[in-house]
Image: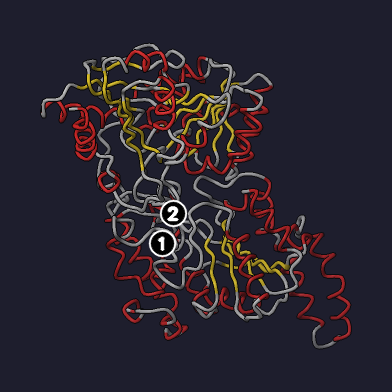
Amino acid sequence: MLLDKIQKTGDIKNIPESQYKDLASEIREFLITKLSVTGGHLASNLGTVELTMALHLALNLPKDKIVWDVGHQCYTHKILTGRKDKFDTLRQFGGISGFPKRGESDCDCFDTGHSSTSISAGLGMVKARDIAGENYTVVSVIGDGSLSGGLAYEALNNAAKLETNFIIILNDNDMSISESVGGMSKYLNNVRTAEGYLNLKADVYKQIRDSQPKVVNGIRKVKNSFKQFFVPGMVFENLGITYLGPVDGHDTKALVKAIKEAKRVKKAVMIHVHTSKGKGYEPAEKHPARFHGTEPFFIENGIPRNAKTTANWQDVFSTCMCKLGERNKKVVAITAAMAEGTGLKRFRNIYPDRFVDAGIAEEHAVTFAAGLAISGCRPIFAVYSSFLQRAYDQILEDVCLQNLPVVFAIDRAGLVGSDGETHQGIFDLSYLLSMPNMHVLAPKNKWELSDMLKFAVNVDGPVAIRYPRGHAYSGLEDHRAEIEMGKSEVIYEEKDILLFALGSMVETGEEVRKLLIDKGYNCTLVNARFAKPIDEEYLKKAVKNHKLIVTMEENVCVGGFGERVRSYIDELKTDSEVLTIAIPDQFVTHGSVPQLKKMLGIDAESITQKVIERYKCFM
């Protein structure tokens, strides 16, 4: 096998040109086989095999730098840099990451995970290179979906000023996670079909090159006018960025040629590459969104290995949104390129006029929601926790400052597992709780998510509801008290120890309570429901017969729910103590959620041990 000849960076250059197609096929087969077991980002990687091969052939790594936007498409890069034998550990605890990581290889020059960052980072590297008087190539690879993010346009504006080489590769596959949307997507579609200009240029040049050499110079002077006429907009050229393409993203030789040509340009140059997401695996070609981030699957048909037996939180949210849309004509659903991931696909199909995909542009989505709210609508923005933090300023200034009724449905809140540091939703409580006018809730089970959404659309102010990834807890079905502003829900009431648990930690709280009772301790379990405002009235009563108050949250400890409760208890000047159970002040690596909880000390057994150790201080 050709892959066996690639053991380290640069080995691909020993592969004969005639065997590039065979190598690409082997890489695809390898990725499909490995990801069918581990899961991971399949479709995006299948689409960029030849592009990655071309980069490694045309560049000199690790001296030259490749910045992968988001990094979903970096698997072939990892194979070509000597990490093939580690793919059995992909996204597993202690294994290699699904994203570029500088700690893994000196060929990974920038840690990524969120979109639209690659051009900015690449520009910084170019500036540092020129300041140091060094000579190497910097390439930023960005997808058409990521190009919908505002940061990319800020960087392009800055790149236009360059008088030194910087290569931007636009990987255009019509997709982000869901289909790409917006004006740039339409523009790129037009460029792809602008064969009139491309054919005219080739035909005219061929006819006059030999017979009329002086005319060639004249044509060079006016060729931009032809571009303006035949290629709509020429937006990149107008910005001052040299445009090359479109190039077939599955033709390794053509890609190598384009990259080598781009290296000679003493300014910013964009190579427009057209690829097919999921190429080489029929299920992924037909359903690229489903195979964007896939669980383990059967190769023969693409069906997940682990059949879903219970509804997940996204399923529950999807059903609730459809019912809300039917009952309230003012409800508008918003997503940032995550219609399927967040569960809004059904709402989009039923109420297309009240569904908006803003693209990978969370800042815009939030301020857009503010405009809807101030005009009488009830916008619900469904977004992953780790992506919402990109819109901090817009939440604070455009929504909270004006006290507008925008609902933030915060998906993947807490530990998400295999995607690692960039995707763990462990910071949203810390920044949302600091915002005046914001109300923050977290459901204990699937029925409470439904009740909280119904509650939220009737609040005259901003509301955030955070819920985790994975199966929706169906326990405590009989505990369904009406949602009241700032009121908690008592599940079991005794004395001595109070477990004051928020959201997903109520399920863990049940386990902790059972363990404590087995060891002879009295224990109350309360579903906090609200992280803001907290139930001060209940806490004021609880300190009278509880010596230890244990707050439980799936968020970092700094600025979180526990600190807010502790602050209030301190004001009461009581003898009760507060034990905060939260994620330590650190970034959290990839691994399964149970593994990570145990590592962080927020699993039931670890919490029980901490509670007993603290409570013994009173005995």
How far across and down, in percent of the image, does residue 558 sit? 44, 40
Q: Which numbered marker is on residue 285?
A: 2
**Position in image of residue 250 (x %, y %):** 51, 68
24 or 124, nearer to the observer: 124
Q: Quadrant of residue 119?
A: bottom right
Q: Is residue 460 left or right of residue 154?
A: left
Colouring style: secondary structure
Q: Is residue 584 above or below residue 95?
A: above
Q: Residue 142 placed where, x, y %?
A: 57, 59
**Residue visible at 51% across and 20% down?**
325
Task: Indicate which disc, 2 or 1, sits on the residue closer to the N terminus.
Answer: 1
Q: Position of residue 229 (x, y in %)?
A: 82, 59
Q: Amino acid at mark 1?
A: Gly
Instruction: Count numbered badges in the picture.
Output: 2
Q: Amino acid at mark 2?
A: Glu
Name the residue rendered at 47%, 26% in the picture: 440
Gap between marks 2 and 1 measured at Cα: 7 Å
- Name which quarter of the figure residue 16 lies in: bottom left
User: Picture quarter containing residue 46?
Assistant: bottom left
Quadrant containing the C terminus is top left
Q: Is residue 155 left or right of residue 312?
A: right
Q: Residues within 10 Å of mark 1 (few under 14, many from 20)?
A: some
Return the residue nearer the eye: 618 or 46: 618
The label number, if any, that marks residue 280 in the structure image? 1
Q: Split into 4 quadrants, where in the image is the N terminus? A: bottom left
- Tell me what residue is drawn at x 58 percent, y 38 percent: 357
Proximity of marks 2 and 1: CB atoms separated by less than 8 Å = yes
Nearer to me, 255 or 238: 238
In the image, 182 versus 568, the foreground residue is 568
Instruction: Decide: is 587 above or below 532.
Output: below
